[in-house]
């Protein structure tokens, strides 16, 4: 039987904007505008469930939306553990997508900013085989304290821990040294090439592996169209190419990648299979609009 993954991270509503051309300052531009469920942690949980892994997801949402989100996750085979916030509404993310499929974000994290230790206590870690924490949870003091307590308890229970840094913008703002100190040692790191460059202070994948492997037992670096690599303190152990696909929207591709890898890992598959599942999941994600499987 596959072990259950616990995911901790943000819940957002993604407003996805695809302009027909360059933005015209002070005037109009026709665009396709769609609303989709999102948030890095939420995306990871849904993609994990879609890959067949049992998933528990802990987060904080606006109290008025709690029942709606609980239904959304249960319909996608995710066990929700959601706290309802009476002070702040649920988070909202505006995504601007350029003609190449690359995206830029405007973020209002809303209720996610009030995640607290009480939201992550009790028996949340019972029967859990792996804990995945989105990096967004470290960028504000309250959520950071909450996930640090949870990480400490996971380490006491010898539960493997995986970290997704989540945002180069926020990483640059707080500083890579501070982020690495907040996270502490972990079993897995899933970073894209830009995140790995910031965290390791080097642009070469081999050097990034060695630098990050001093803190994370296994390091997976997502290199977009170039594929992905797996390694650690000894350097690159595995590297695989990515299939050539037309990118419609890269939102959630990294979340899908991590979920594909971890779902295979929880099934007991070897590392090369996990990496191939991850790459296939990421390629699938960029061909659909929004951060969760349709």
Image (cartoon, helix red, strand yellow):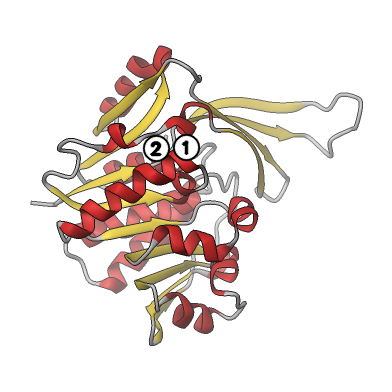
- Residue 227: which numbered mark, if any? none
Identify the residue at the far left of this view: 1
**Where is residue 59, by image quadrant?**
top left
- How packed mark 2 is, by other alpha carbons closer than 10 Å (few <14, some 14-19, many 20 or more), is many
Badge 2 marks a residue whose secondary structure is helix
- How packed mark 1 is, by other alpha carbons closer than 10 Å (few <14, some 14-19, many 20 or more), is many
Badge 1 marks a residue whose secondary structure is loop
Q: Quadrant of the C terminus?
A: top left
Q: Are marks 2 and 1 in contact (CB under 8 Å)?
A: yes
Q: State the residue position of label 1.
A: 39
Q: Residue at x 49, y 31 (%)?
A: 12
Question: Is residue 286 toward the left or the right of residue 261 in the image?
Answer: right
Estimate the x, y position of residue 26 in percent, counting from the top left. Answer: 92, 26
Q: State the residue position of label 2.
A: 42
**Observer able to see residue 243:** no
**Observer able to see residue 31:** yes
Estimate the x, y position of residue 219 in percent, counting from the top left. Answer: 40, 71
Q: CA distance from mark 2 to mark 1?
A: 5 Å
Identify the residue at the far top of this view: 64
Question: Is residue 14 toward the left or the right of residue 96 in the image?
Answer: left
Total marks shown come to: 2
């Amino acid at each position: 039987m596959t072990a259950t993954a616990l995911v901790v991270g943000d819940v957002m509503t993604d407003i996805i904007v695809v302009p027909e051309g360059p933005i015209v300052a002070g005037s109009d531009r026709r665009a396709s505008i769609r609303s989709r469920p999102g948030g890095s942690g939420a995306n990871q949980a849904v993609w994990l469930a879609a890959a067949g892994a049992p998933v528990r997801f802990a987060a904080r949402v606006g109290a008025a939306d709690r029942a709606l989100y609980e239904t959304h996750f249960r319909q996608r085979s995710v066990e929700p553990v959601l706290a309802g916030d009476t002070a702040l509404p649920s988070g909202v993310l505006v995504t601007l997508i350029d003609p190449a499929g690359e995206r830029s974000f405007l973020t209002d994290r809303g209720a996610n900013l009030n995640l607290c230790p009480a939201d992550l206590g009790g028996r949340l870690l019972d029967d859990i085989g792996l804990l995945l924490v989105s990096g967004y949870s470290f960028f504000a003091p309250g959520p950071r304290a909450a996930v640090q307590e949870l990480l400490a308890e996971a380490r006491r229970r010898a539960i493997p821990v995986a970290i997704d840094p989540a945002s180069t913008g926020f990483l640059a703002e707080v500083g890579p040294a501070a982020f690495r100190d907040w996270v502490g040692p972990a079993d897995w790191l899933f970073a894209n090439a830009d995140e790995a460059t910031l965290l390791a202070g080097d642009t070469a994948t081999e050097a990034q592996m060695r630098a990050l492997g001093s803190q994370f037992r296994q390091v997976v670096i997502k290199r977009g169209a170039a594929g992905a690599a797996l390694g650690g303190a000894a350097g690159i152990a595995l590297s695989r190419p990515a299939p050539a696909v037309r990118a419609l929207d890269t939102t959630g591709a990294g979340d899908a990648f991590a979920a594909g890898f971890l779902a295979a890992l929880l099934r007991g598959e070897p590392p090369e299979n996990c990496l191939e599942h991850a790459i296939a999941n990421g390629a699938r994600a960029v061909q659909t609009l929004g951060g969760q499987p349709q």
